[in-house]
Image (tube, helix red, strand yellow):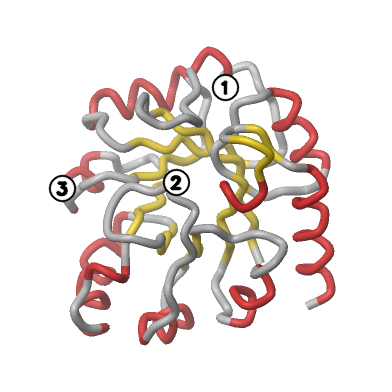
Amino acid sequence: MLLKICGLTLPEDVLWLDKQGIDLLGFIFYSPSPRCTDWQVVAPLKTKAKKVGVVVDLNVAQIKELWVKADLDLIQLHGEYGREACKDLAGIDLIKVFWPERYACIQELRRELDRFLPYVKYFLFDAGKSKGGHGRSIAPGKWTSLLADYPVFLAGGIGPENVKEFLKLGPLGLDLNSGVELAPGIKDKTKILTVLKVIKEQ
């Protein structure tokens, strides 16, 4: 089970999370987000965990520049990025976000995953039908059967009170953000330690 903590803004949170053995640390580069940060904050942070840059509206050239300047390990495409953009970002490990609630049937979602699979490292299933950061949990559905076939992280309002239910679905990883916060961008260490304890007990 891989664990990603996203929406980080404080260097002290980043360093503490790295000591806890978190696998991936997410930084949002989208100015409308209350969790938006700057590459100058992220670049100096040296961690064992992989650093992920979350982008929504940057073009391919801007993403490549950010990847270098912020010293990132992965890019998470959280906007309306097509397959051509993923192909143009060859050489960068990508996380491509999908919103299962958009799709009328599981076959349609599977076809889309197959189209992107050659170009991305991981998929991320989020709640809602676009963007993110709304804190709502993703609704269970037939899409859960896809978790056995694809490298998927689950996101959307995951925290201590519901993490066990998401673990039962068997994803490759979980992506936690608003469910483990004191305030937007400020993480709650107690909640995170509780989540880690639940994961270890499974």
Q: Dot 3 corresponds to which residue?
A: 84
Q: Which of 185 and 20 is in front in this view?
A: 185
Q: Is mark 1 on a helix, strand or loop?
A: helix
Instruction: Say few, some or many: other residues with alpha carbon within 10 Å of mark 3 (under 14 / 14 to 19 / 20 or more).
Output: few
Q: Image quadrant for the N terminus? A: bottom right
- Please name the residue shown 79% across and 43% down the image: 189
Residue 140's disc is none
Q: Where is residue 41 in the image (x, y as percent from the top left)?
A: 57, 16
Q: Dot 1 corresponds to which residue?
A: 42
Q: Where is residue 154 in the image (x, y as percent from the top left)?
A: 50, 64
Q: Where is residue 12 in the image (x, y as percent from the top left)?
A: 75, 25
Q: Dot 2 corresponds to which residue?
A: 133
Q: Is mark 2 on a helix, strand or loop?
A: loop
- Please name the residue shown 28% across and 39% down the image: 89
Q: Label 1 is placed on what type of residue?
A: Val
Q: Label 2 is placed on what type of residue?
A: Gly
Badge 2 vs badge 1, beta-carbon distance below 8 Å = no
Q: Label 3 is placed on what type of residue?
A: Glu
Q: Earlier in the sequence, mark 3 or mark 1?
A: 1
Tell me how far mark 2 sits from mark 3, CA to CA.
26 Å
Instruction: Say few, some or many: other residues with alpha carbon within 10 Å of mark 1 (under 14 / 14 to 19 / 20 or more).
Output: many
Instruction: Say few, some or many: other residues with alpha carbon within 10 Å of mark 2 (under 14 / 14 to 19 / 20 or more).
Output: many
Q: Earlier in the sequence, mark 2 or mark 1?
A: 1
Tell me how far mark 3 sits from mark 1, CA to CA.
28 Å
Which quadrant of the figure has residue 140?
A: bottom left
